[in-house]
Amino acid sequence: MQIQGRTLDPAVQLMLASERRGLALVGDRTDVARRRAVLRRAARLAMPRPRGVHSVDRAIPGPAGRIPVRVYRSLAARAEPPAIVYFHGGGFVVGDLESHDATCRLLARETGALVMSVGYRLAPEHPFPAAVEDAVAAFAWAHANPRELAIRPGEVAVMGDSAGGNLAALVCQRARDDGGPLPIAQGLVYPATDLRGGTESMELLADGFFLTSEDIDWFLRQYLPDPALRASPEVSPLLADDLSGLPPAHIWTAGFDPLRDEGLAYAARLADAGVPVRYRCLDDHVHGFLGMGLLPDGLGLARGVCREMGELLATARC
């Protein structure tokens, strides 16, 4: 399968064929509880659970009550490592600490950083701005409590995939605008940066590549009951007037992902604003590759992303 000179990985093609056959098992795709349960089960099958990482569940203060978090530390990590506050993907509707558990374990092991995964509030029960408020509060708490987390003071980065990449980008912008402490770095994996849609990749890859335009529209209707909000920079970080003064970034996209073009556009705008940024597109993959360790090269690919995030942390700390 080829589109725009890119060839889809044969193993990914096989996975997509299997997914199409399994969609009937999902049933009603507008059933929020069922979609959450299906993702949780699929994630356990798709990503092996790395060893050598200790985790503990806790709750931290949030704007509407306690926010559940899971804190990961590699058994080989040095004393007082830097920290990564991680926001999971799932369209602001699905996904949780369990669905991204293996990914966060791998991230902690490969970077040596403490990883704090955030169970932010989900739509439709909690539409915008709940997720953003929780994300901002989680970063602020981690930055303000280095002794409690046993991390080096001031060395807290943010990272997220898909909807979580959107939240990580918005946390950086909010921190800058509020004059508070900034994350030392931001890792954005196939981030949603322009919720208006309309890009070339959104049109060309609307169906058949794991994340569909129908999925995206359904997620956004849960998260943003008012469609006009999609054009607000408060939800679409690409639309902010000024991107200067933000932390150094690494952005990863996939060649067969509807969100590809908005990730590239955000990287370009950051570079134009003078922000150090690295961009890499995995041309032969689809949305969600960070959690597809079952593929022949999937675990190696995810490990590479984690190591590149570790390199970004090391550079930002210099």
Image (cartoon, grey):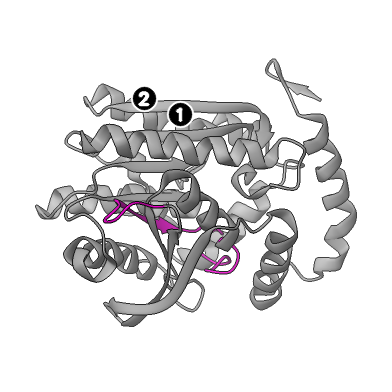
Residue 67, position as x, y percentages in the image:
37, 77
Q: Residue at x 49, y 44 (%)?
A: 110
Q: Main secondary structure of the magenta part?
A: loop
Q: Quadrant of the N terminus?
A: top right
Residue 202 shown left or right of residue 172 in the figure: right
Which element type, helix, strand or loop, lies under badge 1?
helix
Q: Is residue 106 above or below residue 90?
A: above
In this view, the residue farthest toward the bottom is 65
Label 2 close to label 1 by CB (< 8 Å): yes
The residue under label 2 is 268
Q: Tell me which amino acid carries mark 1.
A: Leu
Residue 64, position as x, y percentages in the image:
31, 82
How many residues crowd around disc 2 within 10 Å: few (fewer than 14), some, or many (20 or more)? Answer: some
Q: Which mark is residue 264?
A: 1
In this view, the residue farthest toward the left is 179
Q: Residue at x 68, y 54 (%)?
A: 47
Q: Is residue 281 above or below residue 223?
A: above
Q: Quadrant of the C terminus?
A: top left
Write down the quadrant of residue 121 in the picture: bottom left
Q: Tell me which amino acid carries mark 2.
A: Ala
Residue 52 shown left or right of residue 68 in the figure: right
Which range is magenta? 77-100
Residue 3, position as x, y percentages in the image:
72, 22
